[in-house]
Amino acid sequence: MTMKKLILIFLTVFLSMNAISQESGLGLGVIIGEPTGLSAKLWTSEKTAIDAGVAWSFINSGFLHIHADMLVHSFLIDVDKGKLPLYFGIGGKLVLANDLGLGVRIPLGMAYIFDSAPIDIFIELVPVLDLAPATAFSFEGGIGVRYFF
């Protein structure tokens, strides 16, 4: 399967989910870090969302990284304009390299949601328990921006 087909399948699945459940929309954007690539977020309620990414990891000789997480947001920090939720969640990742990789992700992050524009910016740190091809513990993370439709 080519990378173009994988990206097309990914976008089709998440755009179709938009019709099923949407509180504050579907956001598409980029994440820069480890890995670096495309980011999507679909709000499923006022406090929960599904986050996903298709990205390139630069570890070793590089590989395609696909992940999806269920997130819970806490709006404890009060700001004058917009919203600044902290979030945490759990999800999984699939690594397409010489050896197929699987892992469990525990994303921890903060996002700023603008009042005046359909944009959010975020930063996250993600502890990862790799399960295959070998068991290992690592960290991923990055900064990103998404536009909400």
Image (cartoon, rainbow, N blue to C red):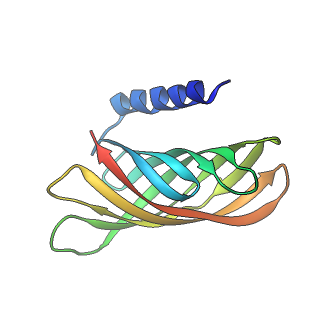
Q: Could you tell me residue 122's position as x and y percent?
A: 39, 62
Residue 66 occupies which quadrant of the picture? top right
Quarter holding the N terminus is top right
Vertical order, 54 against 112 (above or below): above
Answer left or right for 53 relative to 103.
left
Residue lying at the far front in this picture: please name it: 61
Q: Residue at x 14, y 56 (%)?
A: 116
Q: Is residue 47 above or below residue 97?
A: below
Relative depth, front residue between 126 and 18: 126
In the visual, does 42 lie left or right of 38?
Answer: left
Q: Nearer the viewer, residue 108 or 117?
A: 117
Q: Please state which of residues 90 and 41 is positioned toward the viewer in this rendering.
A: 41
Side of 23 relative to 9 (left or right)? left
Q: Position of residue 82 (x, y in %)?
A: 20, 64
Position of residue 103 measured from the top left corner of the image (x, y, whole percent) = 71, 52
At x 59%, y 54%, the residue is 35
